[in-house]
Amino acid sequence: MSDIRIITGHTTRFNPDQTLRLLGCRSGSDAWDRTKKDVMERIPVLRRIIRPKGAFAMKEDEGKTWIYAMMTLGGAITAYTGRLREEGDAAAALLLNAMADSSLFSFEEELQQALRSFCREKGCGISRRYEIGTDLPLPWQQRAYDCLAARRTLGLTMTPDYMVVPEKSLSLVFSVSPDPEEFHAGHDCRQCAHRDCRLRQQPYGTETVVSASPAFQEYTCPAGQNLAVSLRGQGELPALCGGKGTCGRCGIQLVEGDLPVTPADRNFYSGEELKDGWRLACQAVPAAPVRVRLPVHREGQMTGLHQEKAAAAVRTSGDYGLAVDLGSTTIASSLVSLSDGTVLDSASAVNRQRTFGADVVSRIAAACDGQADELQKLAMDSIEEVLHKLLAPYPGMRQQLRRMTLAGNTTMEHLLMGWSCKGLGSWPFQPVSLGGVTLPAAELFGRVLPDSCMLTILPGFSTYVGADIASGLIACSMDQSDTNSLFLDLGTNGEMALGNGDGIFVASTAAGPALEGGQLRCGMSSVPGAICSVTWNKSGPVVRTIGDISPRGLCGTGVIEAMAGMVKHGIVDRHGTLREPWFTEGFPLAQGADGTPVVLTQRDIRQIQMAKSAIRAGISVLLKTAGLREDDVKTIWLAGGFGYYLKPEAAASMGLIPPSWAARTRAAGNTSLLGAVQALTDGRAVERMTSFIQKGREVVLGNTADFQSLYIQHMDFTDGTI
């Protein structure tokens, strides 16, 4: 039988200040003083209903020696706070819940004292502390539970998904060291790699990690404010519909407090999910403070960047430049040597403005509604985040930056520069500027960039065909070509350009974010874990993810390849309808590490159909306007993240481009960034861009007689698109 040691917290120490931090109060504020008084008054109640008890034991596992420990406050505190919620006193329940958490942390200090005595007895030490669910996967919970006979010794039970009951319990693992002088059993925030750890002493609004579920963060939000607004500064809360309650991407789970169910909530969540507390943040305004659980949306380095990462990157002399692609979804940047044009490194990050919506129309509306300053700050913060990633490995190089070029669509440039967006959202769609201006970078970014660095905002064609497209056309040398080419940038807006060096027709169609994974149930950006390739064998789909890790969702190329295969294999009919038995729940493409399926639903397919139809209709209108046939177009440049991964035959088979174009399609990558790099290194690049813009003619697709009929025509998956 294992040598299981039991400890009981007879007079558990209690830290009121820690409770206040867990509740999100700021030290010195009125809320701090008022809430502290409430906390002190409830201490006798807490001490009557908690029953601190813990157990630990040493065991060999996987060739190593561990100490497993579990602690609990008993089930009475959970039952008591549950009754308070049922009686409508959510504030008292929230307060006591935080007090219980603080008590559990304090009880761990008693555990450490017992562990020190145990280690002296055994002649060993402790090299590290691990919390199950944060530092170790949840299945380790089973090891601790079995080792400690936790049902017998502590009265604990465990659910099939490794959740411990009662709720106020904590599971720890300690690695045993042969050195008795080594004792690192405590949580040291100075050494902790988890910057979002719940034990870190944080001000109001910052995040805490739930030990039982490492894929979530918890936040306390104030009364009277829309939750999407409250959570906007707390990492990433996708709100791709701009807060209209139609995309379903801003889901949060209520932990403490009350949030009424809205009609939009019922559209996205089942009765069971609503009962479990799932709500749309953009539709929720709490009458009293609430605590909510937010799924983690950390989307590290984007893939598909222009990178040459030369050995020359280690040099510290000479002048350098920065090229930036300010995308509506992603921001990318390259560090460039101005002496020889070498791209030394590239980095990227999510554009934080997406919390206002995935499309530029939502952001224009928000800017015109008094939130322009916040949108500008989010853009600058996102760019600064990328520049920090880019420059961190090269100390001292920041002061040697001399030039910076930036390409973005017209709305993104307006939001960054603080220009009024009123002319962008209504006829006659008149921008304040189409770019082409140069200013000291420090005017926007302050001390982040040196006074010597000059920033050029690259020029664009029009309100909806911006500098990102003009930059891309130069990168593909379309201004110097004698043959006709089509440039296609598949993003939230499907921008396209058709022509040659003598002239160019440009257009933009509101494709929506579906082809980038946006607004799809399992959609995501092109980051590790995103399904980027889907092939088929006799058993069904075979997926590949970015980073070759467990699937987390679908990015744009995965969406298109999955859709092409589903049409080909009869899973979707020619009208875009999922066949049974998948119509209701969606077609499963893969399964994530936690067992959650990655699916394409019927609603997803409708979004994809509308996007592909808008793009294909736009191509047809451009061809007709230019007086060209499909065979007259010799090269199709596929730009953006799609250009790195998308198989042209998949794009053709699901109807994005004519079937005959598959063999002529070329991957161009992030052409907006490539063109911005060229503008740094080629003295004539900006002049070429400006000259080509003057040769351009914009085709407003919505004003053409054929667009709507072509849009309907290309909606179905016909024989010509399979």
Image (cartoon, rainbow, N blue to C red):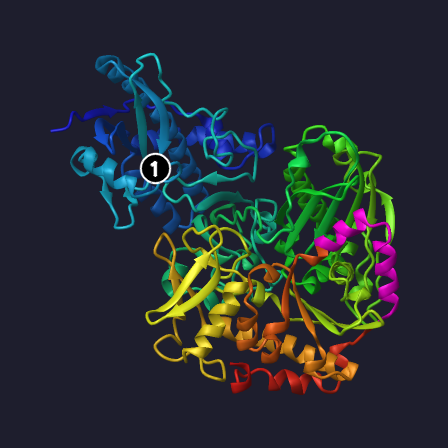
Task: Describe residue 280's horizontal placement relative to residue 274 as left or right.
Answer: right
Tell me: residue 34, above or below residue 164.
Answer: above
Judge left or right: residue 471 versus residue 353.
right
- Magenta part mainly helix, strand or loop? helix
434 to the left or right of 333: right
Could you say which quadrant of the image residue 644 lies in? Answer: bottom right
Residue 415: x %, y % from top left = 76, 54
Q: Nearer the viewer, residue 177 or 150?
A: 177
- Percent from the top left, x then y, of residue 529? 46, 53
Residue named by callout 1: 132
In the displayed structure, would residue 345 be above or below residue 601? above
**Quick check: is 550 in the magenta stretch?**
no
Residue depicted at 50% across the width and 70% down the height:
604
* Residue 564 vertical position relative to residue 118 in the rendered view, above or below: below
Residue kind at label 1, given as amino acid type: Ile
Query: Which structural element holds mark 1?
Result: loop
Q: Is residue 389 above or below residue 66?
A: below
Would you say 342 lies left or right of 158 here?
A: right
Q: Which residues are magenta?
A: 673-696
Nearer to us in this view, 655 or 339: 339
